[in-house]
Amino acid sequence: MSSAASTSALSPLQPNVKLVPRPNTERGGADHGWLKTFHTYWDPRYMSFGNLRVINEDRVEPSEGFGTHGHREMEIFSYVVSGELEHKDSMGNLEILKRGHVQLTSAGTGIRHSEYNRNNKSVVHFLQIWAEPHTRNLRPKYFTRHFTDEEKTDKLVTIVAPIGSEGVKEEREGSGPAPVQSNVTLKSTILTPGKSVEHVFSAPASGETQRKAYVHVIQTSGYNTEAAKGNRVRVNGGLELSEGDGSFAWGAAGDKLQIENIGTTPAEVLVFEIE
């Protein structure tokens, strides 16, 4: 932001919260035929926003996918928007993930996995997120959680949270947020027209004055590489975002991100809080 005035114009309800928009048109991405992908973190200016490293929004064509490949020292989670995603890995896990599923792999000392759309008719649409772990040389682990549309409708639900946080269980499957070995919390909502939710910033890390956050509006109405359209939300009474748009945010403990649906159709929104 260039000035306090421009910051408050984007966030009039919370003038101490700094917002920096990330329009859909500024995301990196490519159409490979079998894969249509967007990369929020494509721009090197954003590669070190906290410990988040990747927010990819992918669409994989029927009977296509990512072949077996390796990862290490990374927390990798997939959020399935629509379709079916097969996950298979070197830990012996084989699972078909559908809408509402959140799958988290703590790669630790190293894993190999593949991700395929085995459905021969429908595209699978999902987000893959990477975060750096707070501890290295961990034993690889696998977790899945499922959250229904009803659970998320007009509520901001925590779906991924650091191990040790309230309600987090280190179980392969179960209730509550998926456990992550990183200082990242992910929340999700499906906002109906006229409704709003609030995220309250947690206390910053020792020696810091603010926490970081990122808001992302999922492209639920179709693939679009141009100016964002479709579902619309307003953040803190100022900044307006449509599908594919996002915003970086900074706030002190107790500051808020108020997200309101100002469109005519439900909007699916993710909110990351990052140390």
Image: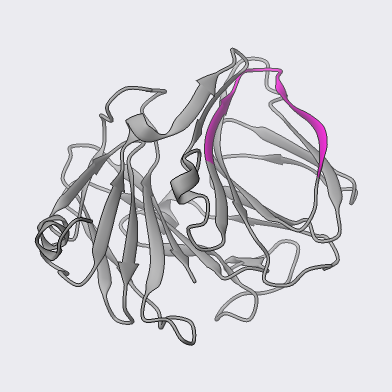
What's the magenta bit mostly, secondary-structure-wise?
strand
In which quadrant will I find the N terminus?
bottom left
Q: How is the image coloured?
A: one colour
Q: Nearer the viewer, residue 45 or 39?
A: 45
Q: Nearer the viewer, residue 200 or 197?
A: 200
Kindly tell me whether residue 136 is visible in this rendering: yes
The residue furthest top is 33
Q: Nearer the viewer, residue 274 or 165?
A: 274
Relative image position of residue 230 (x, y in whole percent)? 26, 30
Residue 109 image-quadrant placement: bottom right
Relative image position of residue 249 (x, y in whole percent)? 33, 61
Left or right of 43? Residue 246 is: left
The residue furthest bottom is 206
Q: Where 66 falls versus 132 (above or below)?
A: above
Q: Which residues lie in the magenta part?
A: 56-70
Relative image position of residue 50 (x, y in whole percent)? 50, 63
Residue depicted at 54% across the width and 47% down the height: 100
Q: Where 119 falls versus 48 (above or below)?
A: above
Residue depicted at 59% across the width and 12% down the height: 33
The residue furthest front is 2
Left or right of 254? Residue 140 is: right
Q: Is 264 included in the stretch rendered in magenta?
A: no
Q: How many marks?
A: 0
Q: Where 225 falls versus 275 (above or below)?
A: above
Relative image position of residue 274 (x, y in whole percent)? 48, 66
Q: Is 58 included in the stretch rendered in magenta?
A: yes
Left or right of 43? Residue 98 is: right
Residue depicted at 57% across the width and 71% down the height: 183
Kindly tell me whether residue 81 is visible in this rendering: no
